[in-house]
Amino acid sequence: MKKVININFQGRVIPIEESAYEILKRYIESLRQFFANEEGRDEITNDIESRIGELFGEQLKKGVPCITDADVESIIASIGRPEDFEADEAEYQGAKAKATAEQTFTPGGGSQGHTHVRTERFFRDENNKLIGGVCAGLANYFGIDKLVVRILFILFTLGFGFGVIAYLILWVAIPSTASEKIGAYRKRLFRNPENKLIGGVCAGLASYFGVHVWVPRILFIIPFLSFVTNWHHWGAFNFPNFINLSFSPGAVIIYIILWLILPEAVTTSDRLEMKGEKVDLNSIKNTIQKDMEGFGERAKVFGKEVGEVAAQVGSEIGQRGKQVGSEAAGVARKSGSTIGNAIGIIVKIFVYFILGVVTISIVGALFGVGIAATGLLPLKSYFIADGWQNALAWGTYIFFIWVPVIGLITWIIRKIARSKSNGSALRFAFIAMWILGWVCFIGLLASVSNDFSYHNSPNENAIGISNPGVQKLQVKYVKNDRYYFNSSFLHLEPFATLDEDTAFVRNIHLRLLKSDNDSFHVKMLKIAYGASKQQAQQRAENINFNVNQKDSTLLFDRGIPITKRDLFRNQSVYVTVYVPVGKKIIVNNGIGWANDVHLNFGGDMDDWYWRNDNEGYDWDDNVEYIMTNEGLKPAHNSDVNDEDNNDSLSKPEEPAQPAEPKAVDSSRYHYQPTNDTEENDAKKTEVSITPVRTIKKAVKITDITSALFERLSL
Amino acid sequence: MHSFDLSFKKNSCMDIQNTQSQMRKGVLEFCILSIIQQGEVYPSDIVDKMKGANLHILEGTLYPLLTRLKNAGYLTYRWVESNSGPPRKYFLMTEAGLQFYSKLQRTWKELADAVETLTSQDGKENLPDENTQQ
């Protein structure tokens, strides 16, 4: 039993079975799609329709009560399905595509039927390819020499390493010219909305490669997990390792980029293309039937949405097309003569080159910021408290730093590929994410600066030294007795060393003062900051910084250990050495000049009087001084003059021995009895003078970033 | 911006079917023009006539071809009342179409002669050629 309906078809009233009508409708729709690029598409489909109507009429004249499925099928067979006459068409369209400035139909569907766009879509060039034809395709697209594109690509790759990923993505995502011209059977990469977990990227990849959806998912998840658990291994230590990058956070970046550039398989033919099934009426029908089972009522809503999106995209593309069209016309008019043509090409190359350089440098700079931030990640847990602050830090890292990077890269790829999908939603999403990033960033700043609100009350403690009666005291850092990981790539200058769970900060200030009796005294003041006075106090007490005397040497710890529990809150140590009159002191290089790391949030930091103290005497590294009643004076006669003459005067005295190594082996300095002779002392002075004075300056946290940039630029 | 690409083919490599259809396609336009040149026709008559000459063409291929020729100015059409249903579109040749056709005809003659000469030579010279090579 079948339902028969009457249709008005090309001026005839045709009684037709409902199922036959469905077949007919789908067939005509497929014809419409097939001829969508044709100039006289309406006329062609109209002619075919009227021919079908005529054949219906003949059939009915034979006395059959209505048109059946079989009738429709036989008529379709005699006229032919799109796939039957595809070969001619593909060839014709291929030729047409070659003719430049050809106008084709937009995908805006019927609603935008008369919007014409100059479409030279971005294809990989199969004929001129070197690897995948991506560069050649880009060159075709922009109408410039492919050599230029290749060189730019190589520069891009060498500069940022990102060229490889971009190339691979474009290789996969962009169809090749071969598939277009020959009309070859091809699959296309789509996002699969049916099976999606996040964005349908994995599902689409699975459909494309014909594997189970969990295969790409696991491939994406494994590196991501290792990225999360081992983040500190790639941040500072193995950073230049490109593979490491691409396989860990790279997986996430690739996922996001694929998510953005891959179209979602919306229409039935998209879905068929995604799976690589041959698109013919039967398979379309099958899929539609499957859809109907699955979606049922939602189909209407779905269709409406699709229509809206299509209309929106259509109008947007239409506008863009008009713009491009007028530009193209302008260029065409200008380049009427051959000379004009040549000039046009040169100008074009020049403009694209400039644009390319500008874009690449913007992306590069952003990428650099991102990488710098990544490089700072290992230090994160010394600055950032767990909980909210940590979340804000990650939010800042992802949304404030990386989102604009990815956004810009995506934007460029979309520009190049002339992506069809809805750009405004994407833009909105990016802006929203970036705003979130700003919120995180400001929140983080507020939260961290709050932790720097108070410092502890300064309380100077005397340090007992074992032999305060020495004639001469040498101040130096304790020898590095442990293996500290010092990445050659990421050397954070102010942080002396970075241990497994401890960072060492050399916020060590040294003052030399006159002792009021005949023995050396050492006093130490520990300063730390916190959100409250008590917190600061606690943190200051936790500073474990040791000053020990060994023979005539005063040994300072390498730095103030900052643990992840205590966090870095401007911990610093002020050591005062009181030198008795008539006794000598020499300070090895680097000590007390405070390779100073401190964060200044505009609190009371600058008022801290120790920072600008005038009490201590000036001194230079590796110069022996003697304390007199008038103050600290260089022990050697030649050093009496002002310090600027120091170097020039001391140089001739320099012995033939090699320059003093920085980390002096303490065994070279044997115990010297207190009644050490002047002669011996003088000799020692000669030894300990190094010809080069190291230039020191206070290093602020901002300098870390600039130091990083310097390294990155290498 | 590209329309739905419904043209799929599993392989693009040379096979006999492909070559045959390529050869046929080349002369399709010429054959159609020669039929229309004889007097105005209805498209399905063209299909029948060609079928009679053992040259198969689908109406789905014919209509776009006619439209293109018409848009190029080589053909025109006339509505002819039909005794059953709406009027039908009959195609006839224009002056430009006639010129176009005569050019095609000349090309075809040259081509046919060339092919004839070559293929007959081919038959004669192929065997001794192979023998000498061996």
Image (spheres, helix red, strand yellow):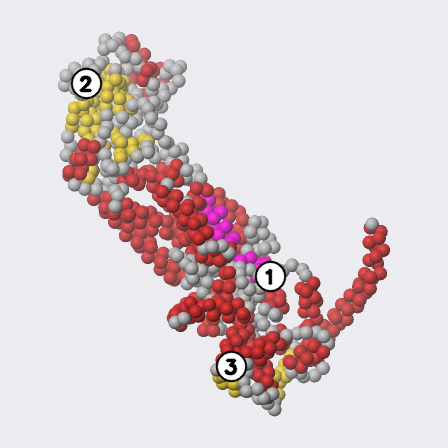
Instruction: Look at label 1 and name its amino acid.
Output: Lys
In the image as oriented, which residue stretches furthest toward the bottom?
B83
The image position of residue A481, as x and y in percent, is 33, 24
Q: Is residue A416 visible?
A: no
Q: Which numbered disc, 2 or 1, marks the residue closer to the eye?
A: 1
Res. A520 mark? 2
The image position of residue A78, as x and y in percent, is 62, 76
Res. A17 mark? 3
Give the residue at mark 1. B10
| Mark 2–mark 1 distance (CA, rounded to whole Å) | 93 Å
Up the image or down, A335 lies above or below A26; here it is above
Instruction: Look at label 3 and name its amino acid.
Output: Glu
Compared across the picture, whether B36 is left or right of A572 comes to right
Chain letter of mark 3 equals: A
- Seen at 41% across and 39% down, the residue is A239
- Magenta residues span A160-180
Chain letter of mark 2 equals: A
